[in-house]
Amino acid sequence: MPHRLRSALSAVLTALACLLLPFGALSAWAAYGLADTGRYVTTMAPLAENPYVQDAIADSLGAEIVHTMDVGPFESGASHFVQDAVHSFTRTEAFRAAWDTANRATHEAVLDALRNDGPSTQSPYGSYGGEGAVTIDLAPVTAQVKRQLTDDHVPLASHIPVAHTEVAVLPAQDLVPLRKGFRVLEVAGFWLPVTAGVLAVTGIALAVQRRRAITATALGTALGGALLGVALAIVRRLTLSDLPPGVSAPAAGAVYDALTATLRTVSWLLLALGLAVALGMWVTDRYGRAGRLRRASATPGPAPVPEPTRVRA
């Protein structure tokens, strides 16, 4: 194969590999990070101790409890007691256990809805009704709050109704497109990183000057990692600027940061690895050239050929 064609093909393959790498990291994170219930629960668990998340849940749950209470003229005083009690409850071990259980049940229900078209599943916190919406039930949390209020002898605690209040986390009309997208992500999460690696290795193998090809691949990897980090920051800003009314921006930011922590780490690793390999190739090339120049200057040149002696007759 001509050198010019090899160089062009190597450049194309290297560019494609560097372009696919951040998309492969994103797909793998979605397919194997977010889609794993155990990892998801472990990721979300520290948020139970985040004050912004605690306050957001306490305000929402307290308002829901007061709204369903029938306390007549005592509504103002009852609201104060309930809000204080709910805020106190979010600082307890019972809340952290309920938080983990609710996240696990909701995640399992969402995965079941995205992966299966079959019968419904249900747990104390989350449910999926076949082609219906995925919902979570606030009744178990309300029951725990009522129990704590009663133990603390808070007035009107016995009037708190423990109703099964279902909140949709995945509407039924969104199931079909989300299910298709999730299946594409599961396939892309494996094949995109593999394809990027194969393209990079093939591009380096075809290159006429492989050292330059390795350096270009490394710099492209670093650039992909940097672009991935910038994209995460932009999406975070757009997400927080378009929240529904009543949703706490600090709490939403904490949730976003927790979910994307692994992806941010991957972006930094790609950036650092790419720059380290490129720097290593530059250093070894520089010292290699210097060594060759020293060896060339130290090698003695060929001895001069003596002129033939002329003998006079």
Image (cartoon, rainbow, N blue to C red):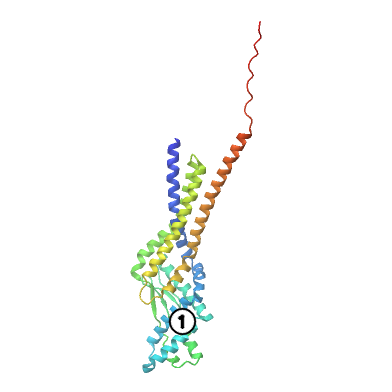
Front residue of 280/6: it is 280
Front residue of 191/50: it is 50
Look at 44% across and 46% down and name the residue there.
13
Residue lying at the far left of the rendered structure? 173
Residue 68's image quarter? bottom left
Q: Is residue 151 above or below residue 35?
A: below
Question: Would residue 191 be seen by someone viewing this image from the given angle?
Answer: no
Question: Would residue 49 be seen by someone viewing this image from the given angle?
Answer: yes
Residue lying at the far front of the rendered structure? 312
Q: How crowded is mark 1: few (under 14 residues within 10 Å), some or many (20 or more)?
A: many
The spot of residue 54 in percent (x, y) is: 47, 78
The quadrant of the picture occupied by the N terminus is top left
Q: Is residue 302 above or below residue 248?
A: above
The spot of residue 125 in percent (x, y) is: 45, 77
| Disc 1 target residue | 141
Q: In this view, does 294 lie above or below 124?
A: above
The spot of residue 241 in percent (x, y) is: 37, 69
The quadrant of the picture occupied by the C terminus is top right
281 left or right, relative to 114: right
Front residue of 270/150: it is 270
Total marks placed: 1
Look at 45% across and 51% down and name the residue there.
18
The spot of residue 177 in percent (x, y) is: 35, 64
Look at 38% across and 61% down and name the residue there.
181
Element carrying mark 1: helix
Q: Three-letter amino acid code at disc 1? A: Val
Residue 293's image quarter? top right
